[in-house]
Amino acid sequence: MSTLLDVRNLVTRFHTQDGVVKAVNGASFTVAKGETIAIVGESGCGKSVTSLSILRLIAQPQGKIVSGEALLDGTDLLKLSTEEMRKIRGARISMIFQEPMSSLNPVLTIGRQMTEQLELHRHMGQQEALAEAINLLKLVGIPQAERRVKDYPHHFSGGMRQRVMIAMAISCKPQLVIADEPTTAVDVTIQSQLLELIRGITDEMGMSLILITHNLGVVARYARRVYVMYAGTVVEHGPALSVYHHPLHPYTSGLLASVPRLDEPRKGRLAPIEGQPPDMMCPPVGCPFQPRCAYALPKCLTDRPELQEMAPGHFTACWVAFSGETLWQKT
Amino acid sequence: MTDTQQPNPSEMAEVTQARPHRTLLNDAWIRLRRNRLAVAGAIIILIFALGAIFAPLITKYNFAKQDLDSIFLQPSGVHWLGTDELGRDVFARMLYGARTSLAVGIFTQLIVLLIGLPIGAFAGSKGGRVDNLLMRFVDIMYGFPDILLIILLSAVLRGTVFGNMGGGIFVIFLAIGLVAWVNVSRLVRGQILSLKQRDFVTAARAMGGKGTYITMRHLLPNSLGPIIVSITFGVPRAIFTEAALSYIGIGVKPPTPSWGAMIHDGYNVMFTAPHLVIVPAVAIALIMLAFTFLGDGLRDALDPRSRR
Amino acid sequence: MAENVVIEINNLAKYFPITSGLFFKKKVAEVKAVDGVSFAIHRGETLGLVGESGCGKTTVGKCVLQLYRATSGEVIFEGKNLCDLNENQLRPLRRKLQVVFQDPYDSLNPRFTAADIIGEPLQINSDIRGSDFDRRIAELLDIVGLAPYMADRYPHEFSGGQRQRLGVARALALQPEFIVCDEPLSALDVSIQAQIINLLDDLQDKFGIAYLFISHDLSVVRHMSDRVGVMYLGKMMELSERDEIYKSPLHPYTQALLSAVPIPDPAVEEKRKVIVLKGEVPSPINPPSGCVFHPRCPKAFDDCSKLIPQLKDAGSGHEVACLLYKTSWP
């Protein structure tokens, strides 16, 4: 499989009244053509900022991409002019957000919002664009699409709005769809409807998909490869099966141990990760996970570990793992 | 059990090392100090206030003393800002005028608070029919043009015992205050209605807190920020209204100096003695700008959303 | 068994009126948020209440605490029907019924210190003051795993997990017999959720508190609860022992709900068959006839749109309201 998107050492910061938030500190990942990857992590780990940085949608002027590369088929997105970047958004990379209501314009009909994009990126005429919009709405399972295309966003339920977002995201047949917590705002039965829909469409149209989520179950169900982010950097990545069954980073294994599972006998007590995620205004020196890590070595306090391949395709950034210790691994 | 009873060391460290311990007001104070415009505004207000209070020490002239031998004098070492058509010292009149303006600003807002706060709080926390009734009344007040209502009120009040108190200035306080309270009562009601939906208020109800307790302990203290901001913006509005009233001749009675009356008096000789208009106009502009800057700064500083 | 019951809910219903009109509010419709729900909670037991948003689970919690007054039905606590009491009569009972909220940012007064927050129930309901008060605050902070020096800090100085600990400490202050936990974890990060789950578990072991644990997360409910009730559109669809309901769910809705929850294991997920329900939850203003679930039910048959199934024991205490089971037929 050939690489579609190659993000290298992305660093993004936010300048706020209280200080500089180091939101992303050297995150790297790749997506192959037609592949689905997941970026998993808790709030504040930088997973959303990473995706917004790639699309250069970081809030200005507080937010700033300090360094790094984001190569889409070899072109560095971070070096493009504003005009060139605008042509990429929606046409080659599109995004599905968590809260569809805030990403849809409340005073325009769904049809108008969809045809606008089609006319702009696919150079369609008005009639043709409207017909295509109806087709797309049918594709994402909106009943009576011919009628609903004239409705405004507030006429739709949360799940239906997210379907509209999906239709808009795929309308220009992008190579890459980024879904940022697409189902966090909806119920589980709607979550499976939407995720099945996203998976079906991206598979069929050969699109790559980046699924950003905090839900370990969703990752397990939909992604082949997974990146685990913590404190603005990738701490572990690899094939989902390998990461879930043989986590190499204590954060990953801690995360997996802290969620109750429906399919396993009920445990008496859960094993939480103690402490809190770091304040990204003053992240810890050395390994970012070190203050919460039960296995930290003296070296962890001073030197930041870089990602190393420990098993085929399975990378981690952990001094304890490098030293050959596997004490937290599941048996 | 052991690990929940033992506070986790890293957890404690996170709180202690990351950010210094600050109360919300502390926090607001620090942010306000960082806002240069707000600080500049506060300094201008302070200068005017000191000038108004210590006016007799700053200038040797009496604001009312006429000297027909030296009328329309240009600014000089003797009369810093010149004299007017009756030979009165303009600098002295400006200083004493600041007394009028600041008094109007502060006392009207006091009246506004005294009326608007209880009515808004009562309507918001009681809700239902009481709220409906009070707010329809407020809406009607709102519907009238402010300035018209103030002129009417001051005309009516002039005939009462307030008419001659402090050279008519009392009438101005009352007229403006009795009209402007609707803004604050609306604001307080809105704040309280939205606060009532918050879980901490529900929690207080769930532990058996009574209505008045909840209003005094939870609802009002949390509406304080927006109220302070609204009052700060209310001051320059009142100052401007007083100036306008005095300009059209129904404000404070002469010889009590007022910036608005000074502009009125200087208007006829604007081209021969422009300083008679420029001085009070600049004073009004400065004090209004200063309060607006301070109000903006306070709003940003007191808004808890800007820091989590 | 019966004398062990802490709180009993019988046929609880809560309809919210929808009004219109400029001066005279006229009722034009009703939202049947909760429609005939019954259950009992025993001493030291956790009853989990699961369902999707709009199913009425939060409304049940608020009605139990009398934060909403029920339209009809009973809430029996200490032999009294709380629905019949006025606010003054309720006040002495309120201290024994507490609540932990979902959003730890919303549930703590930003102008209170931690000590003010935890001490508020004591201020309102007891005359503990002075050094006894301070000692109790320190004790409560310790119980929920916070350090004593944090007492004079403000909510914005705490992280989400720590704030939720404060919320728990406040609920504990009056040593209640019963706590409603209304989605206490859903605003927290995964790694922090487990901390709060363990805390709630430990407190139950230590003080024998009964919980009504309201959540949309089926995995968490399984971990926390002794018995589980599944709600849909204001109705209880299934109610049973935890293991029973998770091993052999009887109601098609419960089955679909369980299958929709992804399991954090790619190997397991690959082999799993997901039941994807069609459509969305209908409006509670105009709920479907018969069984409210029938328009989305994969196993629905003709009678489902006509007959209202009854929540009845389908064997060994496993209650279900579905016409697939003979016992539910009216």
Image (cartoon, rainbow, N blue to C red):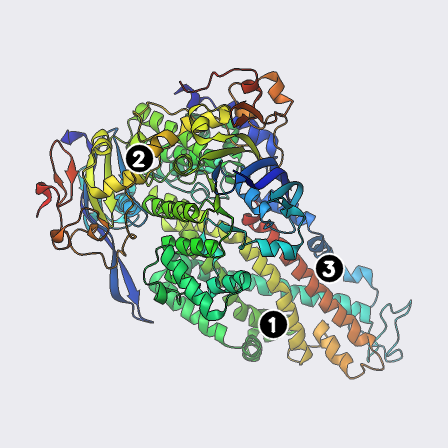
Residue position marked by numbered label 1 in the rendering: B172
Determine the residue located farthest toward the bottom in the rendered image.
B268
Vertical order, C52 against A316 (above or below): below
Vertical order, C94 against C244 (above or below): below
**Nearest the camera: A126 or C295?**
A126
Which quarter of the rendered picture does the N terminus of chain B lie within?
A: top left
Q: Earlier in the sequence, mark 3 or mark 1?
A: 3
Q: Position of residue A173 (x, y in %)?
A: 49, 54
Cα–Cα span, label 2 and label 3? 82 Å
Q: Quadrant of residue B82?
A: bottom right
The chain identifier of the residue carrying mark 1 reads: B
**Nearest the camera: B200 or C135?**
B200
Residue position marked by numbered label 3 in the rendering: B53
Q: Quadrant of residue C211?
A: top left
- Which residue is rendered at x = 44% and y = 25% of the image? C142
The chain identifier of the residue carrying mark 2 reads: C
The three-letter code of the residue at mark 1 reads Ile
Residue position marked by numbered label 2 in the rendering: C272
Q: Mark 2 or mark 3: which is in front?
A: 2
Is the same chain shared between marks 3 and 1? yes
Vertical order, C255 against C308 (above or below): above
